[in-house]
């Protein structure tokens, strides 16, 4: 049974529209992450969270917000979507927690197209 | 900032042969993860290493933090091994820094 799930799997949005990507994990990890992956590049960190109510900026946070309402759920919000945000978005859980590093596990990805 | 240089960017193998992928790090990293992105776009965890080597079936990985590199060896390649392989290093600040990926094509 998949431990990190994402919805939707595919999304087409219009420029200037609001987009919310959702992620759910059943790994009981405190840390969760949002990345984007563009063709020919590795994944880049957008936002992450240490636990419910926490959000932190990653390497490329501009144009994105995040929300962590519970241990299990982490959302990525594009308030005003732009074509440059067309990408594949991955959610992950894991990482360093209580001094121990646990490998990160990834969801299946969301393909977002902004027209 | 910290960087991960992955090579080669693309690799073609015939079934039954093998090769190695490599990631070099610009600074000392704490650990490394290797992933394969399958045909459905999902990232599959292959290895996590904080040191030394690990082997799983036809795959073997090594990580040397002092020499700043990691390798992934594939032997007896099969068609289902095709996909994009990523290494990701755990930085000093405990974040994952990804390489740009290796597109592996296994041919009959």
Image (cartoon, coloured by chain):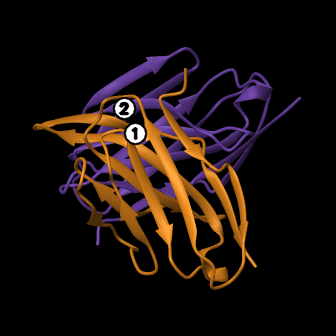
Chain colours: A orange, B purple
Q: Quadrant of the C terminus of chain A?
A: bottom right
Mark 1 belongs to chain: B
The residue that mark 1 highlights is B33
**At numbered mark 1, what does the secondary structure look like: helix, strand or loop?**
strand
The residue that mark 2 highlights is B48
Residue drawn at the location 39% of the way across and 22% of the way down: B54
Residue drawn at the location 58% of the way across and 74% of the way down: A18
Nearer the N terminus, badge 1 or badge 2?
Answer: 1
Asked whether, in this view, residue A53 is left or right of residue B43, the answer is left
- Which residue is most to the front? A69
- Which residue is most to the top? B57
Q: Choose top left, top right, bottom left or bottom right for residue A93.
A: top left
Asked whether, in this view, residue A70 is left or right of residue A107, the answer is left
Q: Does residue A97 sit above or below A58 in this rendering?
A: above
How far apart, in angstroms, are the residues tagged by discs 1 and 2?
Answer: 4 Å
For the residues beneath circles 1 and 2, the answer to whether they share a chain is yes
């Amino acid at each position: 049974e998949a431990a990190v799930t994402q919805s939707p799997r595919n999304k087409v949005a219009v420029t200037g529209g609001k987009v919310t990507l959702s992620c759910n994990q059943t790994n009981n990890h405190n840390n969760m992450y949002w990345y984007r992956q563009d063709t020919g590049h590795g994944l880049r960190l957008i936002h992450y969270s240490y636990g419910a109510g926490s959000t932190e900026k990653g390497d490329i946070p501009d144009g994105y917000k995040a929300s962590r309402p519970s241990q299990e759920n982490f959302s990525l919000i594009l308030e005003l979507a732009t074509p440059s945000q067309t990408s594949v978005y991955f959610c992950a859980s894991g990482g360093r927690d209580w001094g121990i590093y646990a490998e990160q596990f990834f969801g299946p990805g969301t393909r977002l197209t902004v027209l | 900032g910290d960087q991960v240089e992955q090579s080669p960017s693309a690799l073609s193998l015939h079934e039954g042969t093998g090769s190695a992928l490599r990631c070099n790090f610009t600074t000392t990293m704490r650990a490394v993860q290797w992933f394969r992105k399958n045909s459905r776009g999902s990232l599959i965890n292959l290895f996590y290493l904080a040191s030394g080597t690990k082997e799983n079936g036809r795959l073997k990985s090594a990580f040397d933090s002092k020499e700043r590199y990691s390798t992934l060896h594939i032997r007896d390649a099969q068609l289902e091994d095709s996909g994009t392989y990523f290494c990701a290093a755990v930085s000093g600040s405990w974040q994952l820094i990804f390489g740009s990926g290796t597109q592996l094509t296994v041919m009959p």
